Amino acid sequence: MIRYSLVCEAGHGFESWFPSSASFDTQVARGLVVCPVCDTTAVGKALMAPSIARSDRPQAPHPEAPPPQAEAPVALLAEPERQLRAMLKALREQVVASAEHVGARFPEEARKIHYGEAEGRSIYGEASPAEARALIEEGIDVAAIPILPDDRN
């Protein structure tokens, strides 16, 4: 297993484990590696310093070495968190069942509906964090649909 320090296009840092370097490349290409903060799939490897331990004597850190990174937060879900996850999953299923999927055309279609250029209806699709921010700044009511780890498997 390989642990990579990762960073998204918005600069959020996080870590993840992969069976191999090839597995990381494949998962990134398929859009399966997602920032836990902003849900973007524009993710890459962060600059990492190798950690090589010597067993014969303790080593002081190099004066120019970056400070050690904090471990990525991990949680064991208790019952309230499991219930919340179930509600988020139900919300996602309701949106998918009752709204029209417009794919990458989401920002364009949302604007058409908002400005009365298209019929009012519920839609869902894909938008980058920057596109979503622009829609919100225009006063268009949009929200991210929660994606749970089970949805990626």
Image: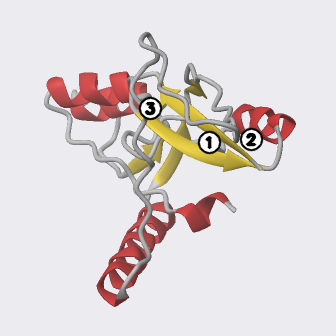
Q: Measuring from the top left, give residue 22's x and y in whole percent.
A: 86, 35
The reply to whether discs 2 and 3 touch (Cβ–Cβ < 8 Å) is: no
Crowd class of label 1 (few under 14; some 14 to 19; many from 20; radius 10 Å) = many
- Toward the bottom, the furthest residue is 79
Quadrant in which the C terminus is drawn: bottom right
Q: 11 and 107: which one is in front?
A: 11
Q: CA distance from mark 1 to mark 3?
A: 16 Å
Q: Nearer the viewer, residue 6 or 91?
A: 6
Q: Nearer the viewer, mark 2 or mark 3?
A: 2
Query: Disc 1 on helix, strand or loop?
Result: loop
In which quarter of the view is residue 55 placed?
A: top right
Q: Which residue is mark 1?
A: 33
Q: Position of residue 148 (x, y in %)?
A: 50, 62
Secondary structure state at the residue bearing disc 3: loop
**Residue at 30%, 35% in the rendered image:** 113
> What amino acid type should be assigned to the residue bearing mark 3?
Ala
Residue 115 appears in which quarter of the rendering? top left
Cα distance in 3D space between marks 2 and 1: 6 Å
Q: Which residue is mark 2?
A: 27
Q: Is residue 145 above or below residue 67?
A: below
Marks 2/3: CA distance?
A: 20 Å
Kind of residue sitting beneath label 2: Gln
- Judge whether residue 137 can be spotted in this image: yes
Identify the residue shown where x is 66% and y is 38%. 31
Of pointers 2 and 1, the one earlier in the residue sequence: 2
Question: Do the numbered discs 2 and 1 sit on residues whose CB atoms are within 8 Å?
Answer: yes
